[in-house]
Amino acid sequence: MLNKSPFNLKKLVPLLVSLFFFFACNEEVKPLEFETSVIDNSYKADIEVAFDKAKTNSEIAQKVNTAITSEIMKSIPNSETHKTVEEALKAFDTDFTNFKNEFPDSEQTWALAIETEVLYKTENIITMGLSAYSDAGGAHGNDSIQFLNFNAETGELYSNEELFSDIEGFKKLAETYFLDHMKNEGSNISEFFFGKSFQLPENIGFNEEGVILLYNVYEIASYNQGYTEFVIPMENVQEFLKI
């Protein structure tokens, strides 16, 4: 006759399952860490590309890296038909080579420079700056800066509307800071927004000082005005934030 075990298997299995989910749910999600990826191929055009990539192979990291790559691709001229950054860069270089073959006396060199920087990182949000410059023979090159705001828990990109609980209230606050910035710069407000009322920029980001508002060239003024950028301290904008 077998000895009866002191353990009841029917009670033990649910207990083990509960413990598994307890530890799984309480396991800390490690914040993303980034490393710089440099594309250093031999090009005839002046091409420099260095961007941040999340190190791990987690689903969150993959979403972040996919979004970064997608935005970089948009910064490369005529990249719509290409699948990778390397392919798009090679095509840009090939176009330059064809140009030089057609116009051998031209001293012009095409240029492409792309760089990212992690500006801010908390348990809720990661802000990355993406700087892109391209010159493919126009009167002057195209220069832009973009802020990518990632949900640190999901890897998804935030829209500007998703960052704020009261975006209209934030807009009114931002206008006061914009006017102060223009006054300090000695600029006339009438030179901006092309006769329209104040508008928030397409690019809103975060750093240790607060919320960054950046208007790219041509966004609210002529090319000669360049970038317009100012920061609102975090303590003054906290009441409008959702994150």
Image (cartoon, helix red, strand yellow):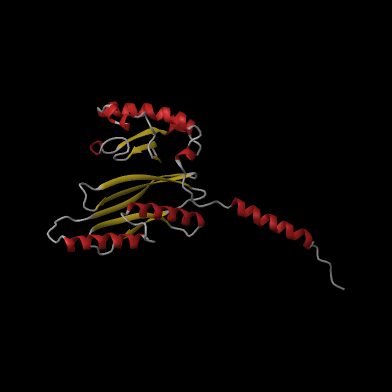
Give the residue furthest to the bottom. 1
**Image-based side of 131 in relation to 120, left or right:** left
Pick whichever, 68 or 239, lies toward us.
Answer: 68
Q: Is residue 132 visible?
A: yes
User: Does residue 79 sit above or below 193 in this rendering?
Assistant: below
Picture mark count: 0
Task: State the image coordinates of residue 134 (x, y, percent, origin top left).
Answer: 27, 51
Give the residue furthest to the right. 1
Pick whichever, 173 or 136, lies toward us.
Answer: 136
The residue depicted at 33 percent of the width and 51 percent of the height is 75
Q: Is residue 44 visible?
A: no
Task: State the image coordinates of residue 109 (x, y, percent, origin top left).
Answer: 19, 56
**Image-based side of 208 in relation to 21, left or right:** left
Pick whichever, 106 or 156, lies toward us.
Answer: 106
The residue depicted at 42 percent of the width and 27 percent of the height is 172
In terms of image quadrants, where is residue 51?
bottom left
Give the residue furthest to the left. 105
In terms of image quadrants, where is residue 73?
bottom left
Task: State the image coordinates of residue 12 (x, y, percent, origin top left).
Answer: 75, 60
The residue depicted at 46 percent of the width and 28 percent of the height is 169
User: Does residue 38 sit above or below 188 in this rendering?
Assistant: below
User: Which quadrant is the N terminus positioned in?
Assistant: bottom right
Pick whichever, 93 or 183, lies toward us.
Answer: 93
In terms of image quadrants, where is residue 200?
top left
